[in-house]
Amino acid sequence: MNHPVLELRDVSVRYGTPTAPHTLALDAATLSVAPGECVGIAGGPGSGTTTLLLCASGLIGADAGSVRWFGSHRWHAGRAAYESASADGHPYLSVRAWLEFSASQREDDALGPEPDVEAVMSLASLCEFARIRVGHLTPGVSARVALAGALLGTPRIVMFDRPFDALSCAERARLAQVLGSVLSAGVAVVVTTRVASLLGDLSPSRIHYLAGGRLDLQPPSMQPWNSTCRCRSRRARDSPCVCQACTGAGARSAFRLSDSRPNRY
C-alpha cells in the first residue's frame, strides 16, 4: 500500500505558560501529502505556517491530533526535513565548505549513506557559487543553499518555510526550477508563503490557506483594513490580522519585495 509521506489529522498546537494565556497556533489542522507531490500553504504573520511545518517535520510535538510519516507514527531522522528561507551556515565559509561540513556531521550521526555534495550542488544549481562565502549570497542563492543542506540527508519530503517571499521575480523562477527538479526525483515538497500568488512559478498541485490556526482549501473571507493591522503597524500586539494581505489571499504582500537586497550573482 502506498502511504502518504505526510499525514496530519486534527493537529492542534498551543503556546504559553501556566501564568500566561495560551495561544492556539494550530487548530485541528488536517493535511495529507502524497509521494512526489508539491503543496503550498499561504498564511500571514501569526497564522501558524511555521508551527505547522515544524510539527510536520517532527521538530515540535502536537498537543492534540496525530502526525504520521510514511504511514507510521515513528519519526524517521533525515527522511522529513525542515528548512528556513535562508542558509544558516557560517557566513565566512564558502558554499562548498559549508555543505561539506554539514555532510560530515550527517556521517558522524549515522543518518544514512554518505552524502554526495557535488551531486546536491548540481541539483540546486550552486556550482557557480561554490567558492562564494555564505554571508555574501543573495536571498535567492541563500535559499538554494538551505535546500541543498536539506537534500544532503536524502529526504523524501522537504518542508520549506517562506522561501519565495523575499525574492525577485528572476530568483523565484530559478528556485522554482530547482524545486521542480527535486520533485522530479520523487521528493515531496511543502512550501509556505505569505501571498499565494508568489507560488505561481512553482505551480503546486494545491494551495491551502492558514488563518488563525485553521487550515482550509478556500481563501479566508477578505476583511477591511484596520488601524491595528500588522501590515500597517509593526507595533501592533493584538491577535493576528485576517485582512486580505495578512492571510495571503490577495496579491499584496505584508512587506515590499523592493526591501530585499539587489541581485549580486
Image (cartoon, rainbow, N blue to C red):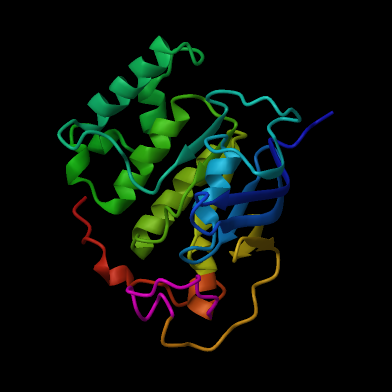
Residue located farthest toward the left when viewing the structure as drawn: 92
158 vs 221, left or right, is: left
Q: Give residue 105's position: percent from left, percent from top.
A: 36, 17
Which residue does the image show at 40% across and 34% down from the upper left?
A: 148
Which residue does the image show at 68% across and 24% down from the upper left?
A: 74
Residue located farthest toward the right when viewing the structure as drawn: 1
For residue 95, above or below residue 143: above
Secondary structure that dominates the magenta span:
loop
Q: Quadrant of residue 221?
A: bottom right
Residue range corresponding to the magenta coloring: 229-243
Which residue does the image show at 41% across and 19% down from the upper left?
A: 116
For residue 108, above or below residue 235: above
Magenta segment: does it hold 43?
Answer: no
Q: Give residue 261's position: percent from left, percent from top.
A: 22, 60
Q: Quadrant of residue 25?
A: bottom right
Q: Give residue 31's position: percent from left, percent from top.
A: 70, 49
Residue 203 appears in the picture as rendered: no
Q: Quadrant of the N terminus?
A: top right
Residue located farthest toward the front when viewing the structure as drawn: 19
Which residue does the image show at 22% across and 46% down from the upper left?
A: 137
141 vs 80, left or right, is: left
Magenta segment: does it hold 230?
Answer: yes
Q: Give residue 129's position: percent from left, percent from top.
A: 24, 38
Q: How many marks?
A: 0
For residue 248, above or below residue 16: below
Q: Quadrant of residue 72?
A: top right
Residue 96 appears in the picture as rendered: yes
